Amino acid sequence: MSAESARTIALPAGEGRGPLEETLAGFTDLMEADKIRHWGVSNLDVADLVELTALPGGDAVAVDQVLYNLSRRGIEWDLLPWCREAGVTVQSYSPIEQGRLLKVEALGAVARALGATPAQVALAWVLAQGVAAIPRSGSPDHVRENRGAVDLHLPIEALDALDEAFPPPSGPTPLEML
């Protein structure tokens, strides 16, 4: 493998993972051998990331992939600010809540006002939060629709309407997972 291609390895979380120190040593070895450039984790909350980054090599974590979308905003309270401060990219899986968000009338109203699709608005909102999104795409047309979110500007009125329909957390929230 060459160092020119971007590769990320995910660190397993939860029960059944190997000793964390050994995993981190392995990632460090792979990075030093130019086999990988970056590695990431999935579904780690602030406490987990603090533990991880305190270990030798743990501060090289590049990304934490978590459930985040308009209806699942709990990470805004603590995880998202922590990751920003630490320089860890946050990546949203299920940014349109497995399609369930597309049925919410408030999202549809914002989309109609902007001449966009609800999926584009939901994805543009995630991107506007500084979070990477990995939506499912089942066809070339779906990929093109998703791509349209990158160019979609959400004016303050749209953001306010989305906040009203999908309020941000008012306090700490346990990390949600699908």
Image (cartoon, rainbow, N blue to C red):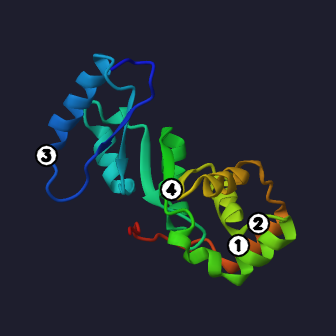
Q: Marks 1 and 2: CB-CB under 8 Å?
A: yes
Q: Position of residue 22 (x, y in %)?
A: 15, 35
Q: Marks 1 and 4: CB-CB under 8 Å?
A: no
Q: Which amino acid does label 2 sit on?
A: Leu
Label 4 – label 3 distance at C-alpha: 25 Å
Out of 101 and 177, give the one closest to the viewer. Answer: 101
Q: Marks 3 and 2: CB-CB under 8 Å?
A: no
Which residue shows up at 50% across the image and 38% down it?
A: 87
Q: What residue type is labelled 3?
A: Gly
Residue highlighted by disc 2: 159
Q: Position of residue 47 (x, y in %)?
A: 34, 55
Query: Is there any visible trace of residue 81 in the rendered image?
Result: yes
Q: Where is residue 126 in the image (x, y as percent from the top left)?
A: 62, 57
Q: Which amino acid does label 4 sit on?
A: Ser
Label 3 – label 2 distance at C-alpha: 42 Å
Q: Residue 163 carries which label?
A: 1
Determine whether 145 is above or below 8 in the image. Answer: below
Which residue shows up at 80% across the image and 54% down it?
A: 153
Which residue shows up at 50% across the image and 68% down it?
A: 74
Residue highlighted by disc 3: 18
Q: Which of marks 3 and 2 is nearer the N terminus?
A: 3
Classify residue 8 as left or right of residue 18: right
Determine whether 168 is above or below 39 in the image. Answer: below
Q: Position of residue 48 (x, y in %)?
A: 31, 53
Out of 7 and 155, give the one closest to the viewer. Answer: 7
Classify residue 7 as left or right of residue 31: right
Q: Residue 92 carries which label?
A: 4
Out of 105 and 148, give the one closest to the viewer. Answer: 148
